[in-house]
Amino acid sequence: SYQVRAQVDLITLINAIEAFHTDHGAVPHPSAPQPMTSTAPLLDTLRGVNPAENPKNVVYLAHPSSDQRDPWGRPYFITLDTDNDGSIDDPLTGRPLPGRAIAWSAGPDGKMNLAIPTAPENRDNLYSWR
């Protein structure tokens, strides 16, 4: 199903960012505005085709392009641990989550409301941390 594919994509993105952090001691593009989307330059860095950020061209994410989209055709959203403290605030609740990155999809309807976690438009969203 599309939901399963999206969930696998989310976990794969997070694992790639975690592996990059393990090798480099920081997340890729820590100064980028947050949340970011699953497009270049983040994907190019994880794909090993951005030598400025990934000088050894290690492939952390096997993806054919610089633009990874959910099954409904929209980019994933990603928030990185830019202060390198090992946690990220949940964009819905504000509570700290352990890890170097979180990612989510706006789901089939393409809508999300980060200000109201229980909003109807969030019902079909998919989250790497839930």
Image: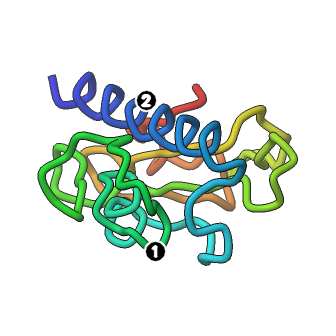
Relative to 112, say whether 104 is above or below. Answer: above
Name the amino acid type tagged 1. Answer: Ala
- Secondary structure beneath dot 1 equals loop
Q: Residues within 10 Å of mark 1 (few under 14, many from 20)?
A: few
State the residue at coordinates (71%, 48%). Answer: 25
How many discs mark residues in the rendered view? 2
Q: Quadrant of the N terminus?
A: top left
- In the image, taking residue 77 as reference, residue 57 lies left or right, namely left
- In the image, taking residue 7 as reference, residue 112 lies left or right, namely right
State the residue at coordinates (82%, 49%). Answer: 94
- The residue under label 1 is 52
Name the amino acid type tagged 2. Answer: Ile
The foreground one among 130 and 26 is: 26
Q: Closer to the N terminus: mark 2 or mark 1?
A: 2
Q: Residues within 10 Å of mark 2 (few under 14, many from 20)?
A: some
- Secondary structure beneath dot 2 equals helix
The foreground one among 85 and 115 is: 85
Q: CA distance from mark 2 to mark 1?
A: 25 Å
Question: Residue 15: where, in percent of width, then height?
Answer: 48, 32
Q: How is the image coloured?
A: rainbow
- In the image, taking residue 55 as reference, residue 22 lies left or right, namely right
- The residue under label 2 is 11
The foreground one among 63 and 102 is: 63
Q: Quadrant of residue 69?
A: bottom left
Relative to 100, say whether 43 is above or below. Answer: below
Question: Residue 128: where, in percent of width, then height?
Answer: 51, 33
Q: Quadrant of residue 95?
A: top right
